[in-house]
Image (cartoon, rainbow, N blue to C red):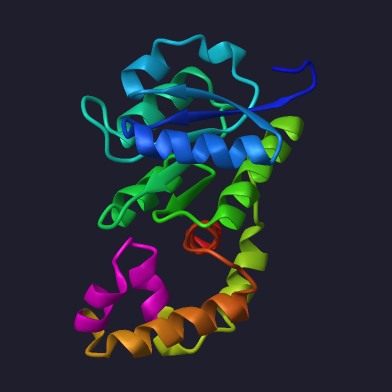
Amino acid sequence: MTLMSKVVYIVDDDPAIRDSLTMLLDVHGYDVVSFVDGEAFLQSDMAAITGPIMLDVRMPGRDGLQVLTEALAELPRLQIIMMSGHGDIAMAVRALKKGAIDFIEKPFQAAEILRSIELGFSNMAVQTAPNIPAPVASAKLDKLTPREREVMDHLVLGKPNKIIASDLGLSVRTVETHRARLLSKLEIRSLSDLVRLSLAAQ
């Protein structure tokens, strides 16, 4: 580990996930410290952490939400990125509301991982979380049609497209189209950005 290296922390009980993330991050010049579960992470010297933490939602023992809550209660400055598999989106949304800076859906997209990590480093540099003024957020949401707003309201609750389609009497393809259009209108790229924007407007 070099003196000026950037360190990313991984908390995941799946060794295959830890290995694949470590390989990706190593290629892009990051050093990695990994933990096999939330308990190991919480018992570590968290005050010495110098980079963002990639935290899995589903783990034995304490789940990701419990680890997030306990870690931020001790050190609010920590920049935690939740990693979510299929079916975990609602939990990841709750985590974002509790202070996670982002959540990434599995299977991972390398570009999204790197973007979230750099967001974490940027936040640590200024010791602040992303903040969108309420009037700005509301003005952005006003661009949406009533149907797009309905789809958005379901998305920020963490519902998958199939459930949204059933709730609104639409096809899954139509929900996917509305989701793509509303993200484009709002000039955002991910569901976590949409949740953050929705929270700011409240």
Residue 5: x and y in percent read 74, 24
Q: Quadrant of the N terminus?
A: top right
Looking at the image, residue 140 sits to the left or right of residue 202; the answer is right
Residue 158 versus residue 172 in the image, above or below: above
Residue 87 versus residue 69 in the image, above or below: below
Identify the main secondary structure in magenta.
helix
Residue 146: x and y in percent read 43, 88
Q: Nearer the viewer, residue 121 or 100?
A: 121
| Location of residue 57 by image quarter | top left
Residue at 55% x, 38% y is: 23
| Location of residue 38 by image quarter | top left
Q: Is residue 69 visible?
A: yes
Residue at 40% x, 88% y is: 147
Q: Is residue 128 visible?
A: no
Residue 175 versus residue 102 in the image, above or below: below
Q: Which residues are magenta?
A: 150-166
Whether residue 152 appears in magenta in the rendering, the answer is yes
Looking at the image, residue 16 sits to the left or right of residue 63; the answer is right
